[in-house]
Amino acid sequence: MPKELSPIETAKFVAAKQATQYVQSGMKVGLGTGSTAEWLVRCLGEMVRDQGLQIKGVPTSVRTAKLARDLGIDIITLDDAKWLDLTIDGTDEYDDKLHLIKGGGGAHLREKVVASASDRMIVIADATKQVATLGAFPLPVEVLPFGMRTTRTLIEETLIGADVLGREVTQRMQGDAPFVTDEGNFILDLHLNRIGDPRDLAIVLTQIPGVVENGLFIDICDVVIVGHGNGKVEVRDITNDTRDVVQFDVQDDTNLFDSVSD
Ligand code: 5RP
């Protein structure tokens, strides 16, 4: 990985770096999935190695588990952890109420289970993830392979009565084969363009048999940390109703990325 990062990677990195401020020794931490969460895992791996940070990580995907293990982070299962101090994860979209669309990486089922078993969920993102209204990003819905076509029809019928702008449903593929989640399920992507009532949609989707989990995270995220390509980081805490700005020196501090970029 190059030491010179693109603005978007810099944004993800500084958001992840800022999120490590919330992590203390002795904590049980949910580790998200995706390119932004990878930066977080790398930063935590560095703190374990260089600063003696002692945490137990609960990964939200096979991919994250492997990376965390490779970096020397102690990994446990959610059942062993029982409850987590916090979860830090990326997002595909977030709105002003900190409702999210997740699942671009196909891990939203485990991500939601882990985040919901945490005292606090912190989302790390670059500024492109902020939206006025959720829905431009296709909403991932994890479904059982059993009866998948029937489930798809039921979803399409449900969308007729939903406050959305688009109603196309596509099955996520990986090459020529269906994408399969870590739980062995399929994903249907709902191209809705605009979701007028995310809370209502999340509820009606959950009521369809065959739907395992949808990618709407409603009232789960507590803090969003948004990184920018110039090193600026905005922190919004919806529980404490605070907004803070932090500036990382990405111009002069060439060592900032060195240790975590290999
Ligand atoms: C995976 C997710 C990711 O958090 C989301 O897709 C964001 O990923 P990235 O940080 O790569 O943009 O929900 O299921």
Image (cartoon, grey):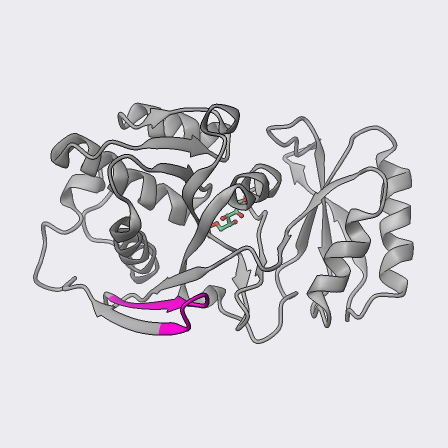
Horizontal arrangement in the rendering, residue 131 relative to residue 242 (left or right): right
Task: Measuring from the top left, give residue 110's x and y in whole percent.
Answer: 57, 37
Please report the residue visible at 48 percent of the width from the left and 36 percent of the height from the top.
Answer: 83
Quarter in which the C terminus is drawn: top left
Dominant secondary structure, magenta: strand
State which region is magenta.
Answer: 232-242
Task: Measuring from the top left, give residue 166's x and y in whole percent.
Answer: 78, 66
Q: Looking at the picture, tell me which residue is in the foreground, 113 or 4.
A: 113
Task: Measuring from the top left, give residue 92's x and y in whole percent.
Answer: 53, 56
**Relative to 240, residue 124 above or below:** above
Q: Looking at the picture, tell me which residue is in the foreground, 236 or 172.
A: 236
| Residue 198 magenta-highlighted | no
Q: Looking at the picture, tell me which residue is in the foreground, 200 or 170.
A: 200
**Relative to 141, residue 65 above or below:** above
Please report the residue visible at 13 percent of the width from the left and 64 percent of the height from the top.
Answer: 251
Horizontal arrangement in the rendering, residue 255 relative to residue 130 (left or right): left
| Residue 238 magenta-highlighted | yes
Counting the numbered discs, the total is: 0
Quarter in which the N terminus is drawn: top left
Please report the residue visible at 52 percent of the width from the left and 25 percent of the height from the top.
Answer: 79
